[in-house]
Amino acid sequence: MNSLLHRLTVGLGSMAKRCGALLAVLLLPIAVLGYPTVATAANWDVKTLTVRENSEGDTTLLTEAQVKSGKATFNRSCGSCHSSGITKTNHNVGLDPETLALATPPRDSIEGLVDYLNDPTSYDGEYSIADIHPSIRSRDIFPKMRDLSDEDLRLIAGYILVAPKVQGSSWGGGKIYF
């Protein structure tokens, strides 16, 4: 009886190890796809974390903590319409660097994006869109904007400018990546 119990215990332990190894092999690719920051951790270098501060060309070096905080705030406040840098209501205007640079005024800097988040205008800069786009100016009708500080806006802007350097062309790539 003792020998049977011992063989049963050893057999179950061996099977658990094999199942655990198989599970690890199957789940690792899913974990990497689900959490791309694991696969892109090597991209957190000075070049990646340096973004334009203003239209004069001054730059700012962000910390990894600032980018992560900006990402969390972006996801809470902007992510429902701008997941992965797209604009769900207009796939022609994304948050990719080229599109931001061609806006009037240009939005490819922290200062430009913060200005937009305070009081958004149409892509050509001709008129205000604060009534239809969340902003500090329209926080009375967009509750997600009510608690955002100037620093939160800067962190969101920093994340928007770093994200394409980490995610590549899938940031702002529109529906071709969905």
Image (cartoon, rainbow, N blue to C red):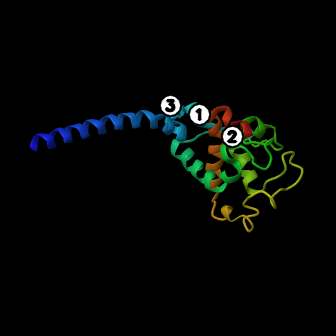
**As drawn, 141 above or below 112:** below
Along the polypeptide, which appears first: circle 3 or circle 1?
A: 3
Q: CA distance from mark 3 to mark 1?
A: 10 Å
Residue 57 can be seen in this image: no
Per the image, label 3 sits on a secondary structure element best described as helix
Number of marks drawn: 3
Q: Quadrant of the N terminus?
A: top left
Q: CA distance from mark 1 to mark 2?
A: 25 Å
**Which residue is the site of mark 3?**
42
Amino acid type shown at disc 1: Thr
* Residue shown at 64% from the left, 32% from the top: 168
Q: Position of residue 8 (x, y in %)?
A: 20, 41
Amino acid type shown at disc 3: Ala
Q: Position of residue 112 (x, y in %)?
A: 74, 46
Q: Position of residue 160 (x, y in %)?
A: 66, 43
Along the polypeptide, which appears first: circle 2 or circle 3?
A: 3
**Which residue is the site of mark 1?**
48
**Which residue is the site of mark 2?**
178
Residue 27 can be seen in this image: yes
Image-quadrant location for residue 100: top right
* Residue shown at 63% from the left, 59% from the top: 149
Amino acid type shown at disc 2: Phe
Q: CA distance from mark 2 to mark 3?
A: 25 Å
Q: Quadrant of the C terminus?
A: top right
Q: Which mark is residue 116?
A: none
Q: Position of residue 50 (x, y in %)?
A: 60, 36
